[in-house]
Amino acid sequence: MFYVRLFVSTMLAAGSGFVPMTPIGAECIPVMLTVEGEDELAESAYGQLKNDIDFSGLLVTADDGYVEVDVSVDRDVDGYRLTARVLSGGEPLMGRDYTGSNFYSICHAFADDLVYDLTGEPGIASSLLAYVNRSDDGYSLMVKSQDPRPPRTIMFDRDVITTPAWSPDGDRIVFTSYRSGNADLWCYDFSSASAVKVLDVPGLNSSPAWSPDGSMVVLTLSKNGNSDIYMLDMRTSAVTRLTTRESIETSPCFSPTGRQLVFTSDRLGHPQLYVMDSSGGTAMRVTRSHRYCDSPAWSPDGDRIAYTARVGGDFHIFVMNADGSDVRQLTFEGTLNEDPVWGPTGRHIAFSSDMGGGRDIYVVELNGLTIRRLTAGGDNYCPTWAPLGFR
């Protein structure tokens, strides 16, 4: 189940020395939601639809909404039926009808359609996240929906799995596995429900990230004794070296245009973030507020970069403009907040955190700055978000 909390960061930020994240400023449309049907079914539908609407960052449920949403739910031969009418000032705006075997899927589908019809922007309620779960038995690559359904294990290994990255077309996830005794790059294919090794040069083959068109993967290799950034052509398996310094370069991420990369380097003695052309060349330092920065993630609109930084002895998530300006602290609780990844609409960030005691995956909505815990149990880390439309 989700657990909803609010970031109450203003007072805490005063002691940290960093400016807290502020809402991204969207004006949410108030929606008055009513759900009718069998008591237990209607209650579940109301709860899920309210969660999806309130977490969209664009709509919000209210007792006196500008928009009235009347929903009825019942069971039928296909499993479930959801019928919705949307009105404004008593005038009909839209009508929707959904049937399917999965109750939560049709709730998400309507919530996303409602967001799109009222704002022109896509919703993320139907989207999925993958992540790594570590247990006493081994490591699992998991896929989780944004509702109470349990996660699905797509593969399990007794050896380490880490740094998964979902492809832009949704068909594949690349990740690092130690199955063969080396940190090799593997690719899980959803169509075949199997994984194959795609790169196994000696040393590290880690921290992969896809190009926006899905043809390339940028990653860290240490085949020459030092960690550098390389480009892997997924069609030809050709590998091109992009950095040639003696320092450690790692954690690359493409810009949305594919023309630039942001990555971590300790070329000045401590890890900082740098931006360079995706073909290589001179890199520009973009972080100066912390002595330790890592795990950069470029937002879908290209304007911002999220990353992990060390504050005292703790690790927290920060967001800055792509040029390094306007640094904002996003997390204030817990001691280990890592692995930030943007949602496909740029209105949400998923990350791993120990703020609840164990290490779990959380998602924060950037307009209301509300946060949800997505996982519970075991050690969960390295989230990666599926593209919109993947089921």
Image (cartoon, helix red, strand yellow):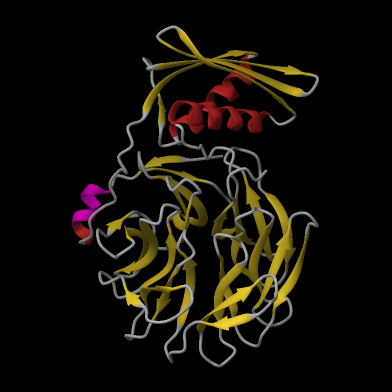
Please give left or right for residue 85 compared with residue 312 in the image.
right
Q: How many marks do you count on the picture?
A: 0
The percent position of residue 355, horizontal first and vertical second, equals 42, 54
> Is 170 one of the magenta-colored residues?
no
Please give left or right for residue 150 compared with residue 115 in the image.
right
Q: Residue furthest top?
A: 90
Which residues make up the magenta segment?
9-14
Residue at position x 43%, y 90% from top? 245
Residue 67 is drawn in which quadrant?
top left
> Of 317 and 236, which appears nearest the observer?
236
Quadrant housing the C terminus: top right
300 over 187 or under it: above or below: above
The percent position of residue 311, horizontal first and vertical second, equals 30, 67
> Of 246 and 243, which appears nearest the observer?
243
The percent position of residue 28, horizontal first and vertical second, equals 36, 30
Please give left or right for residue 384 compared with residue 306 in the image.
right
Is most of the magenta stretch helix, strand or loop?
Answer: helix
Quadrant housing the N terminus: top right
The percent position of residue 145, horizontal first and vertical second, equals 61, 43
Residue 155 is drawn in which quadrant?
bottom right
42 over 212 or under it: above or below: above
250 over 74 or under it: above or below: below
> Of 288 and 10, which appears nearest the observer?
288
Residue at position x 47%, y 89% from top? 244
